[in-house]
Amino acid sequence: MTDPKLQQRLRDGAAAMGVALTDTQVEQLLAYLSLFHKWNKTYNLSAIRDLDSQLDRHLLDSLSVVPYIDADRIIDVGTGGGLPGMVLAIVFPQRHFTLLDSAGKKTRFLFQVKTQLGLDNVQVENRRVESFQPSQPFDAVISRAFASLEDMTNGCRHLLREGGVFYAMKGIYPTDELSAVAKHYNVSASYPLQVPREEGERHLLVLEPLSGAVA
């Protein structure tokens, strides 16, 4: 996809969030968006159908966390169409990303993206999170799919190495959800996110397991 308007929309949006993209990354991100838009018509990857809106609400939303990600081996649980994991894998080619989803049609799409874009730092897993036992635990778990922090931490804690963290992408600041996990997890950082052309609150929370919280 070489639409100059989309290229500029992506570059400007990323720059507004402090994310500088190379020409290769812009090409790869728009190639991913093109595949997402095409497959979405059949596979229902997203309720958002408009290409500009997909760029803003999926690509830019995923890119908004880039300045705060500090981990080398990351698993995106409930990744769906690759959000945010596939986007982050394009931006961080030197880091390894595992994209986990239980829906076969979504992981088939992700395999296609990985193959077509030549993303050697991406591993796609079609499994339920509770049945996935990695050979090596991860530095971080990221997700924007879970209904609550309690669901995320309970369902994914077996995936984290000692000293690993959860990156939880949320809307409004989840005070009640944090209270539910306060006994076992500490909020080491909280970042308000501003996505260009998108309204509504967004936050990235970094949760660290307290002693004994990781199984």
Image (cartoon, rainbow, N blue to C red):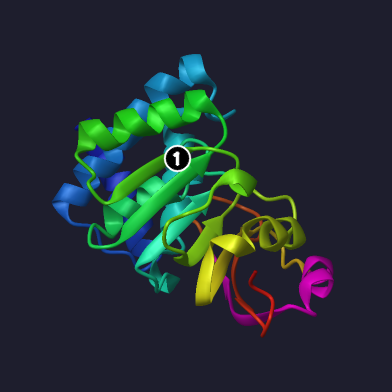
Indicate the quadrant containing the C terminus: top left, top right, bottom left or bottom right.
bottom right
The answer to whether residue 12 is above or below residue 102 is below
Q: Residue at x 38, y 20 (%)?
A: 38
The answer to whether residue 20 is above or below residue 101 is below
Where residue 169 sits: x, y (%)? 59, 59
Total numbered badges shown on the rendered structure: 1
Tell which of 122 and 201 is nearer to you: 122
Indicate the quadrant containing the N terminus: top left, top right, bottom left or bottom right.
top left
Residue type for callout 1: Glu
> Badge 1 is on which residue?
125
Residue 88 visible? The answer is no
> Which region of the structure is painted magenta?
175-194
Residue 103 position by quadrant: top right
Instruction: Say left or right for 118 vs 50.
Output: left
Where residue 155 sits: x, y (%)? 68, 55
Q: Residue at x 19, y 39 (%)?
A: 118
Residue 180 position by quadrant: bottom right
Instruction: Say left or right for 139 vs 177.
Output: left
Residue 17 position by quadrant: bottom left
